[in-house]
Image (cartoon, helix red, strand yellow):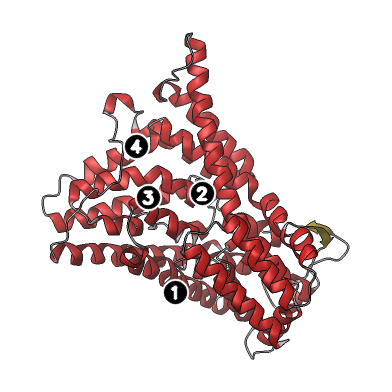
């Protein structure tokens, strides 16, 4: 048992260290999983082919129901959200819709302010609003980064915000990913596992969301202002960004927000992620097709129109596929860990603590997400364990499914963003800054403030069950 626990810890360290050094998690995760298997008496071949990749096995919640685990199971669970979100993010970018939304808000609210420090504070608020709009509009966080990075860089240059704070500005909507009615991975996975609706525990969820975002705003804005007072300046470095299009080359602000508004409304009404995202993609193409970059390879007008739409969708497919594999890879490692006796002893020891079940489950999910850096894996493993222990009926443990869905969705946003997280590596890589130079405000925003939001939501649903 001791060797098994040591193996899990060593594998986790290797996994985190390798990811920090930019080693691909696609092969790093199975290597870490095999280390766990060897030190825990599991056949390495079985660990890779059946546990990491995913095999059909009885559900933890109901042994009579069979399900797929590992990487394959996670892909099945999140494919519509991430892949279609990649397509929507790409067409929103290529059509100029994202640019139109950003430029309208910046020109109306940022540039009229003359004082540089006030400009910086307003600029942070504008980026927060833009990112929350994209998140509530159904665009995945990974995908939104690609859409907002050029906007953020241009804005930072105009205002004079040091480039090392651009990654923090790209993480401003971290509280929105778990807000009620948002079409996000966190909400979709929690909904699918617990069979709850998108508005589960809406009141405590929105209160936590507001508190998180207020804290995130002040952390980021104050960090930037202090840096500007130290006379830190903006510089582009080697970053190549495309300047915003002129107004005539992008759709009107009102037209630009229609697809995202449609995604949000449809998701609330029909509770179907695929339907909502497909509608958003179609509306973007139909309403803004003339603004897409022209396809060079087609001669006829029909060919040119078709070509430029296909080019955009192809790019979105690549973005979605990359995000899918990055997010799902850690689920394989988590699956191997979950099937070890050492881990199960650890879980049982947690449930032996003198805490209410809701508190214990929340702690378990936070620990798992710190181990895996994968919210879907933490939700799948943590919620699967508690469902198995309750026999599929959470009420026997005194747990409200809606309350658990909301708390769990926020909890997996906490230690997800340690320095080895894919989003941290992506944002610092795009801005071409060192993680050590950019990470402190990101840590305070994405780890500490989401932890505050988790605790707040947990307290609300436990003290005031009537608001769930």
Crowd class of label 2 (few under 14; some 14 to 19; many from 20; radius 10 Å): many
- Residue named by callout 1: 452
Work out how far the residue at label 4 is from the one at label 3, CA to CA, in angstroms: 18 Å
Work out how far the residue at label 4 is from the one at label 2, CA to CA, in angstroms: 17 Å
Question: Is residue 184 visible from the viewing direction of this image?
Answer: yes
Which numbered tag is attached to residue 99?
4
Work out how far the residue at label 1 is from the one at label 2, CA to CA, in angstroms: 23 Å
Element assignment for label 4: helix
Q: Point out the frontmost of discs 2 and 3.
A: 3
Which numbered tag is attached to residue 430?
3
- Residue named by callout 2: 140
Q: Residue farthest to the left?
A: 114
Residue ID at (56%, 37%):
317
Image quadrant containing the N terminus: bottom right
Name the residue nearer the viewer: 24 or 99: 24
Mark sitting earlier along the chain (1/2): 2
Work out how far the residue at label 1 is from the one at label 4, CA to CA, in angstroms: 33 Å
Q: Position of residue 282 (x, y in %)?
A: 54, 29
Mark sitting earlier along the chain (4/3): 4
């Amino acid at each position: 048992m001791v060797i098994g626990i040591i193996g899990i810890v060593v594998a986790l360290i290797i996994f985190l260290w390798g990811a920090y050094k930019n080693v691909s998690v696609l092969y790093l995760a199975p290597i870490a999983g095999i280390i766990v298997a060897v030190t825990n008496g599991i056949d390495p071949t079985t660990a890779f082919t059946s546990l990491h990749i995913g095999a059909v096995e009885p559900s933890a919640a109901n042994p009579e129901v069979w399900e797929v685990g590992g990487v394959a199971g996670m892909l099945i669970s999140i494919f519509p959200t991430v892949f279609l979100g990649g397509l929507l993010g790409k067409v929103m970018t290529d059509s100029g819709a994202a640019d139109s939304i950003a430029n309208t808000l910046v020109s109306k609210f940022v540039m009229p302010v003359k004082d540089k420090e006030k400009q910086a504070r307003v600029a942070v608020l504008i980026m927060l609003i833009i990112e929350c709009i994209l998140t509530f509009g159904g665009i995945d966080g990974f995908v939104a980064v690609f859409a907002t990075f050029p906007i953020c860089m241009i804005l930072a240059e105009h205002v004079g915000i040091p480039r090392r704070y651009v990654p923090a500005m790209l993480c401003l909507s971290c509280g929105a990913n778990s807000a009620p009615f948002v079409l996000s991975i966190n909400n979709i996975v929690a909904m699918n596992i617990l069979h709850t609706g998108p508005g589960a525990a809406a009141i405590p969820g929105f209160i936590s969301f507001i508190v998180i975002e207020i804290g995130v705003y002040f952390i980021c804005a104050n960090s930037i202002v202090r840096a500007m007072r130290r006379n830190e300046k903006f510089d582009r470095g080697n970053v190549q960004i495309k300047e915003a299009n002129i107004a005539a080359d992008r759709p009107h602000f009102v037209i630009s927000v229609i697809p995202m508004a449609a995604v949000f409304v449809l998701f609330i009404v029909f509770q179907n992620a695929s339907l909502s995202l497909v509608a958003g993609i179609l509306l973007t193409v139909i309403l803004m097709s003339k603004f897409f970059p022209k396809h060079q390879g087609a001669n006829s007008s029909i060919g040119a129109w078709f070509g430029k739409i296909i080019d955009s969708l192809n790019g979105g497919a690549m973005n979605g596929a990359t995000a899918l594999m990055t997010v799902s890879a850690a689920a394989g490692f988590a699956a191997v860990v979950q099937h070890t006796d050492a881990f199960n002893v650890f879980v049982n020891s947690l449930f032996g603590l003198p805490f209410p079940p809701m508190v214990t489950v929340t702690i378990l999910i936070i620990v798992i997400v710190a181990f895996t850096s994968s919210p879907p894996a933490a939700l799948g493993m943590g919620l699967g364990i508690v469902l198995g222990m309750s026999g599929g009926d959470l009420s026997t443990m005194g747990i409200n499914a809606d309350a658990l869905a909301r708390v769990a969705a926020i909890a997996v946003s906490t230690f997800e963003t340690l320095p080895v997280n894919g989003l941290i590596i992506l944002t610092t890589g795009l801005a071409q800054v060192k993680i050590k130079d950019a990470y402190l405000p990101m840590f305070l925003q994405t780890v500490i403030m989401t932890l505050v939001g988790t605790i707040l939501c947990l307290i609300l649903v436990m003290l005031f069950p009537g608001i769930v």
